[in-house]
């Protein structure tokens, strides 16, 4: 038989939920699968919120920009830089594009 305690409840046992929060129609775990797959949270600076008001706009812009960034990073990896030091001790770089 379980003994009934007369002690007041511990702070973590109290209901601390605000009354204005309504979870009566909530579905438990609805976003768990999405987060388990890997979710990246990005904070948008207030000065660009007028351009990126929602995640759809951000994703569309990033999809359009991604090929350009991929080309830039690919071109950087296909360059060979030669470092030479001249007779006065100055360094100079010569970049050669590899194919």
Image: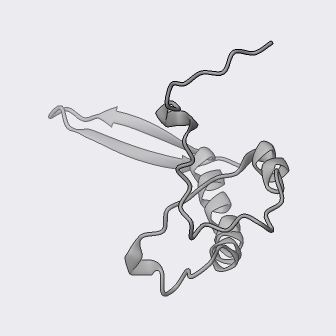
Looking at the image, residue 86 lies above or below residue 21: above
Seen as rendered, the residue at the extreme left is 88
Relative depth, front residue between 63 and 22? 22
Quadrant in which residue 17 is drawn: bottom right
**Quadrant of the frame with the N terminus:** top right
Placement of 39 over or under 9, stated as above or below: below
Instruction: Tell me which corner region of the image, top left, top right, bottom left or bottom right, holds residue 20.
Output: bottom right
Q: Is residue 82 above or below residue 73?
A: above
Instruction: Tell me which residue sits at (71%, 70%) in the image.
Output: 63
Q: Residue furthest bottom?
A: 50
**Coloration of the structure image:** one colour
Q: Residue at x 42, y 70 (%)?
A: 45
Q: Relative to residue 7, is residue 27 drawn left or right?
A: right
Residue 44 x, y percent position in the rendering: 48, 68
Image coordinates of residue 7 in percent, x first then y, are 51, 25
Residue in the image at 67% along x and 65% along y: 66
In this rendering, position of residue 75 left or right of residue 93? right
Q: Report the label total.
A: 0
Measuring from the top left, give residue 21's x and y in whole percent. 60, 66
Left or right of residue 11: residue 60: right
- Front residue of 76/55: it is 55
Residue 4 location, x and y as percent?
A: 66, 21
Residue placed at 77% from the left, 66% from the top?
Answer: 24
């Amino acid at each position: 038989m379980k003994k009934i305690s007369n002690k007041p409840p511990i702070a973590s046992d109290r209901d601390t939920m605000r009354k204005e929060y309504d979870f009566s129609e909530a579905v438990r775990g609805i976003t768990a699968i999405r987060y388990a797959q890997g979710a990246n949270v990005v904070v948008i600076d207030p000065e660009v919120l007028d351009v990126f008001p929602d995640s759809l706009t951000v994703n569309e812009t990033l999809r359009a920009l991604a090929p350009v960034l991929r080309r830039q990073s690919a071109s950087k990896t296909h360059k060979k830089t030669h470092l030479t030091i001249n007779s006065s001790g100055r360094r100079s770089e010569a970049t050669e594009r590899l194919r």
